[in-house]
Image: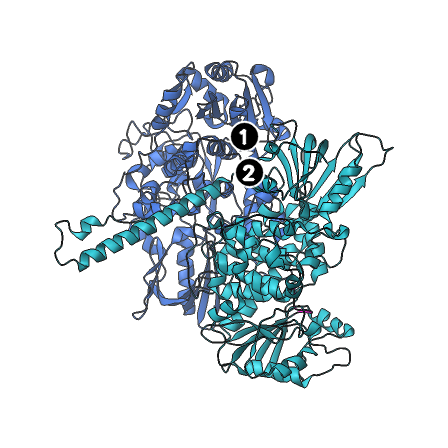
């Protein structure tokens, strides 16, 4: 019997959690029966096997979905119509003053709450335009009332802090409640990207910019040791992988199926990057499920053997485990573990522990806190910065990526990277190693492809990791700024190699913002399977088509860029790494252009 | 004296050229073991000329490992004795003013090298001329012509009906550390000036540094008043400050910034100094800026050196950096200068700046405030004039602070005050990447030649001594080197903006250690040579010039078209391709 936690927020009665006990059944009807009546209009089981013949989601292309996924995806609330949003909106409008920082003049006007936005309509004399905030980007909200007015402080996911001074105590309370309810809606398919229809963009554009097939074409030009497998066509082998993955030609789909059963979450080793100059490859996977009995899997061993056989003659391999040797050993107790040396001839295991999960989130929270303090002459800024250890995480991530890149380029070895689930620090290492080695990933288009291929399609759970940013009071459950850490490392590369990246800081800032809250669908959901189920590709706009408009492009490019075929080896000495001021001090930095 | 074929030195065109003309001569040429602080012992060949020491590796591609002007050396010591055992324990230990290096060699006698190095690194102790006086380099621009005080004051709109130029110090008899030409209030007579001089430390009376082009408020600099324990007063000084105040009618008070911490100013009374008290100077407001003295700055920089050399402190880099307090001092200097600039520009009040003698902290504050207020000083030539005026002519004691050619490495007068100023300028250029015509290399070049003794620019303590030594006739100016090859020092992002006041953010969060300067010798930090960024800068500058030229041609063509009564069949719009740049 599984237990899942369903949080029923925004129902007007304040947040409430319920633990549902779920039996083995997985049909539409089971789920329907478990959720409050009337809360579900779409088929969460959404499966070909759904017994309800009327199920509108019935289609052979629809993947099977576990109950947990279905609840996360659709939220405990029903697909709302405009009616239901309005239920959450307590008050239509109020007079308010908006403060956006010490140097920006305050904005006066009428405040409105809509289903997805907070709007401020400036008074008739005002020269400024309408001010708009996506409610999804609110991370935490705090209200205070005194006399006959109130103050709402909104802390946003992009680290901005906004203050609203509102006339009327009741209005303040109502607006605060509405914002709270609407900003914490968890359902994907009722989120703003499903309603966003910007001028000049066509639905469906750019979603086909970066299919795995395209990367495979490039690999196929360089070597014929690999093939594109559609074994995961219906996401049954691995729910967090895309439909098509690149695997050794010598391994057939049946063997892959058995490998998948031997790896956590079904994430069997797949090709991440082929380094043509050295004829070596970078692979990623999750941990093997060796368990306390130290199980083996012949197909998994053969797969890794086939990798070495397909690389340049005499190539060795390194398994880069992003956990400490101790942690990897301990994982056996819970069914995980690591590759036994004897079973994988030619492969050597290295442990490079990278921080993940809660410690990383806490480091992020402490850093943002330190950046938010008002500066006093006595404050020990640098000691405080050191105590957050964020730059330590940057250093570890970069040096592990350097190690992987070095093993490939300098030692001609193949590298397999994994930690436990293989969806966080693993992706951090493989994507950074590609930036170091591969000049094409340093172009604007190449970097977008890298993010799409190595993060979005590779199954980094954005929906969980980026649910909250650094201000949320809620205890972090699944939140972790792994993707932000990646962006910070890329920024450090750009700072150390000012000519090497075609894009500037602007693109990295945009990706940070959109990963946490966005009108585009690109960062929605946690895997291709979920995106497929929600029809993200057909019902939302892609961020890439938004960013690739000529007027946006101009802002994102680096004027110093000169293409170079060389690898870029960053310095990871502490004095070479800087705090990313453009992000962490973005809103508190005094305006120099006064 | 060993002689080697000159072809070995071809990496240095300066040396190459001048060896032909006999400026340089080779003093030493022998094999040694160099104890590299980063990579351990390296077998190499050391060459010492009368200007430079260099060391070429005998192991790896005969790479040039060391290339140090002798002027940079602060100390040479023998290490080990004839009986010392162990590898590399016998040799010379050479310490530099900006970095350390240890040179050691085995077996042979080290005496000749020790003696030659000491003679040429510390010529003053051996009655030898400083290298700048032997340097016969020729440039197609004469850097000594860059600064002409009369022209600079005329650029500022001086003299006017409130301020006059006086030649009272023509022979340096009013104040031997001031320049010959001074700008003083029109209403103060030369006799007044002489009486004020008796009440100011080292006769450094308040004189004008800069005048605001619009509101006509001024920055005036001087030394501390000689108040002493008894709290002496001087009517002439009080009156003189009032005359200065009256040149500005917008605000009824004169603002005095004393750069020192309050306690230090009080303590100075014991040695006859002090500050302007409220009861004696009714119409003035006094603020202390809490900037510490030369000794504190020297020790702070020494700590920076300790954490970056030979190995960078890794595990607690940020907190060790914090414990040096170097960036805190930078912050206080910048904050002080911002206050001065803001008072003059927004506060519309005239400002008087002093510290104790008015040649260290005062020079930092006035020159930085002027850099913030006046965009002219942000051009290459303007910056040269700023240094020449506020630092060199107003008697910052370069000889004492740097110790050119002097062997007394522990001299308490040495202090990196000018380096600190350049660091502040670098911090500003980081925060305003388009505001300065010069790039980082320009600042580093100035600092390199602050120590090198190749040019006469920074020699001696004041103008009167420089004149006596005929520095401008007998040496080459650093600005000759820079101005004859300006493109190397230009910032491609420079956008000229007249009348824009720059207020940098003097917050610890936005100040950074200047890694490219302080840690540039560390091979892990060392940038590629030639630096690809600098090459790209040159390309971009060329591109910009090309576009500007094209634009001018097109403008010319179109104006010719317009004046032509019979338009040609091709319309102007077809002739004008859209000119656009990447910037």
> Which residue occupies the foreground of this view, A71 or A453?
A453
Residue B242 seen from this side: yes
Q: Which chain is cyan?
A: B
The reply to whether the C-beta atoms of the residues labelled 1 and 2 are less than 8 Å apart is yes
Q: Which chain is blue?
A: A
Q: Judge whether B494 appears above or below A70 on screen.
A: below
Q: Which residue is mark 1?
A: A419
Please report the bounds of the magenta region as a residue range.
B355-360
Asked where in the image residue B95 lies, by quadrant, the reply is: top right
Residue at mark 1 to residue at mark 2: CA–CA distance: 10 Å
The chain identifier of the residue carrying mark 2 reads: A
Q: Judge whether A410 appears above or below B92 on screen.
A: above
Few, some or many C-alpha atoms within 10 Å of disc 2 (few <14, some 14-19, many ≥20)?
some
Q: Measured from the top left, where is residue B218 in percent x and y?
A: 53, 74
> Which residue occupies the foreground of this view, B260 or B11?
B11
Q: Measured from the top left, where is residue A493 in percent x and y?
A: 50, 40
Query: Residue visible at 79% across and 31% down?
Result: B108
Query: Residue visible at 48% across and 78% down?
Result: B160
């Amino acid at each position: 019997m599984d237990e899942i936690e369903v949080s029923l927020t925004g129902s007007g009665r304040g947040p409430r959690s319920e633990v549902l006990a779920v039996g083995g059944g997985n049909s539409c009807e089971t789920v329907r029966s478990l959720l409050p009546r009337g809360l579900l209009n779409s088929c969460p089981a959404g499966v070909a096997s759904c017994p309800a013949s009327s199920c509108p989601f019935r289609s052979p292309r629809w993947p099977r979905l576990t109950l947990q996924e279905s609840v996360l995806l659709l939220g405990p609330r029903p697909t709302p119509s405009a009616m239901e949003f309005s239920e959450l909106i307590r008050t239509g409008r109020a007079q308010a003053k908006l403060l956006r920082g010490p140097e920006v003049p305050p904005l006066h006007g009428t405040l409105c709450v809509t289903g997805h936005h907070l709007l401020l309509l400036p008074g008739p004399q005002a020269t400024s335009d309408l001010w708009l905030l996506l409610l999804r980007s609110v991370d935490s909200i705090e209200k205070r009332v005194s006399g006959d007015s109130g103050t709402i402080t909104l802390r946003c996911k992009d680290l901005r802090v906004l203050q609203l001074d509102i006339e009327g105590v009741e209005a303040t309370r109502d607006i605060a409640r509405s914002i709270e309810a609407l900003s914490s809606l968890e359902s994907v398919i009722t989120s703003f990207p499903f309603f966003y229809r910007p001028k000049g963009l066509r639905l469906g554009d750019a979603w086909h910019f970066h299919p795995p097939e395209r990367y495979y074409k490039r690999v196929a030009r360089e070597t014929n040791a690999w093939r594109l497998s559609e074994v995961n066509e219906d996401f049954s082998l691995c729910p967090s992988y895309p439909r098509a993955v690149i695997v050794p030609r010598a391994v057939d789909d049946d063997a892959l199926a058995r490998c998948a059963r031997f790896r956590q979450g079904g994430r069997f080793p797949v090709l991440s990057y082929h380094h043509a100059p050295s004829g070596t490859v970078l692979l990623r996977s999750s941990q093997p499920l060796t368990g306390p009995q130290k199980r083996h899997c012949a197909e998994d061993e053969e797969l890794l053997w086939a990798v070495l056989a397909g690389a340049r003659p005499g190539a060795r391999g390194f398994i880069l485990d992003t956990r400490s040797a101790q942690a990897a050993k301990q994982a056996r107790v819970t069914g995980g573990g690591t590759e036994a040396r004897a079973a994988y001839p030619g492969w050597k295991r290295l442990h490079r522990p990278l921080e993940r999960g809660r410690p990383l989130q806490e480091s992020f929270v402490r850093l943002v806190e330190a950046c938010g303090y008002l500066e006093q002459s006595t404050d020990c800024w640098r000691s405080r910065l050191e105590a957050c250890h964020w730059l330590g995480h940057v250093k570890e991530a970069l040096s592990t990526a350097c190690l992987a890149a070095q093993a490939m380029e300098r030692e001609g070895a193949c590298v397999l990277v994994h930690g436990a689930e293989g969806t966080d620090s693993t992706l951090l290492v493989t994507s950074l190693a590609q930036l170091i080695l591969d000049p094409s990933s340093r172009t604007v288009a190449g970097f977008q492809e890298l993010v799409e291929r190595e993060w979005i399609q590779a199954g980094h759970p954005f929906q969980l990791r980026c649910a909250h940013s650094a201000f949320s009071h809620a205890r972090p459950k699944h939140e972790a700024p792994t993707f932000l850490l990646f962006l910070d490392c890329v920024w450090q590369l750009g700072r150390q190699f000012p000519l090497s990246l075609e894009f500037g800081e602007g693109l990295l800032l945009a990706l940070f913002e959109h990963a946490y809250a966005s009108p585009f669908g690109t960062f929605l959901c946690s895997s291709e399977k979920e995106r497929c189920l929600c029809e993200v590709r057909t019902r939302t706009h892609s961020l890439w088509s938004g960013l690739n408009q000529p007027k946006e492009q101009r802002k994102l490019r680096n004027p110093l860029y000169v293409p170079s075929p060389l690898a870029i080896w960053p310095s990871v000495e502490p004095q070479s790494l800087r705090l990313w001021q453009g992000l962490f001090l973005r809103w508190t930095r005094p305006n120099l252009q006064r | 004296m060993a002689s080697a074929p000159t072809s070995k030195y071809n990496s240095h065109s300066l040396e190459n050229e001048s060896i032909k003309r006999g400026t340089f001569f080779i003093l030493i040429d022998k094999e040694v073991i160099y104890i590299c602080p980063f990579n351990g012992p390296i077998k190499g060949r050391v060459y010492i000329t009368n200007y430079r020491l260099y060391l070429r590796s005998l192991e790896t591609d005969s790479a040039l490992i060391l290339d140090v002007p002798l002027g940079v050396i602060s100390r040479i010591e023998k290490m080990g004795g004839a009986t010392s055992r162990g590898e590399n324990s016998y040799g010379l230990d050479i310490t530099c003013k900006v970095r350390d290096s240890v040179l050691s060699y085995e077996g042979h006698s080290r005496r000749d090298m020790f003696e030659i190095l000491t003679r040429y690194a510390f010529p003053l102790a051996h009655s030898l001329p400083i290298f700048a006086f032997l340097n016969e380099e020729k440039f197609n621009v004469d850097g000594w012509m860059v600064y002409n005080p009369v022209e600079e004051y005329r650029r500022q709109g001086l003299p006017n009906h409130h301020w006059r130029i006086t030649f009272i110090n023509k022979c340096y008899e009013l104040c031997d550390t001031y320049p010959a030409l001074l700008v003083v209030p029109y209403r103060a007579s030369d006799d007044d000036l002489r009486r004020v001089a008796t009440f100011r430390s080292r006769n450094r009376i308040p004189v004008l540094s800069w005048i605001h082009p619009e509101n006509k408020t001024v920055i005036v600099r001087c030394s501390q008043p000689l108040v002493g324990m008894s709290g002496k007063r001087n009517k002439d000084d009080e009156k003189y400050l009032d005359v200065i105040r009256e040149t500005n009618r917008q605000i009824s008070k004169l603002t005095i910034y004393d750069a020192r911490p309050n306690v230090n100013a009080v303590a100075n009374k014991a040695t006859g100094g002090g500050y302007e008290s409220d009861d004696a100077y009714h119409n003035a407001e006094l603020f202390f800026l809490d900037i510490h003295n030369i000794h504190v700055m020297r020790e702070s920089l020494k700590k920076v050196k300790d954490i970056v050399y030979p190995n960078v402190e890794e595990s607690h880099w940020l907190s060790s950096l914090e414990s040096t307090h170097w960036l805190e001092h930078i912050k206080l200097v910048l904050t002080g200068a911002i206050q001065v600039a803001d008072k003059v520009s927004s506060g519309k009040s005239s400002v008087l700046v002093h510290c104790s003698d008015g040649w260290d902290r005062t020079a930092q504050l006035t020159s930085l405030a002027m850099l913030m207020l006046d965009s002219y000083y942000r051009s290459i030539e303007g910056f040269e004039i700023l240094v020449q005026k506020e630092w060199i002519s107003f008697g910052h004691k370069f000889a004492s602070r740097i110790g050119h050619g002097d062997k007394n490495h522990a001299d308490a007068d040495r202090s990196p005050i000018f380096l600190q100023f350049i660091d502040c300028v670098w911090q500003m250029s980081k925060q305003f990447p388009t505001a300065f015509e010069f790039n980082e290399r320009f600042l580093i070049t100035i600092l390199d030649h602050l120590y090198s003794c190749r040019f006469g620019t920074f020699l001696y303590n004041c103008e009167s001594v420089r004149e006596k030594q005929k520095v401008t006739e007998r040496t080459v100016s650093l600005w000759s080197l820079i101005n004859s090859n300006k493109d190397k020092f230009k910032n491609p992002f420079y956008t000229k903006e007249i009348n824009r006041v720059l207020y940098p953010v003097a917050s610890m969060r936005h100040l950074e250690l200047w890694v490219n300067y302080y840690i540039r010798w560390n091979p892990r930090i060392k940038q590629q040579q030639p630096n690809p960024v600098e090459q790209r800068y040159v390309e971009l500058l060329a591109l910009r010039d090309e576009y500007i030229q094209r634009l001018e041609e097109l403008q010319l063509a179109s104006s010719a078209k317009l004046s032509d009564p019979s338009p040609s069949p091709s319309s102007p719009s077809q002739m004008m391709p859209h000119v656009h740049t990447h910037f």
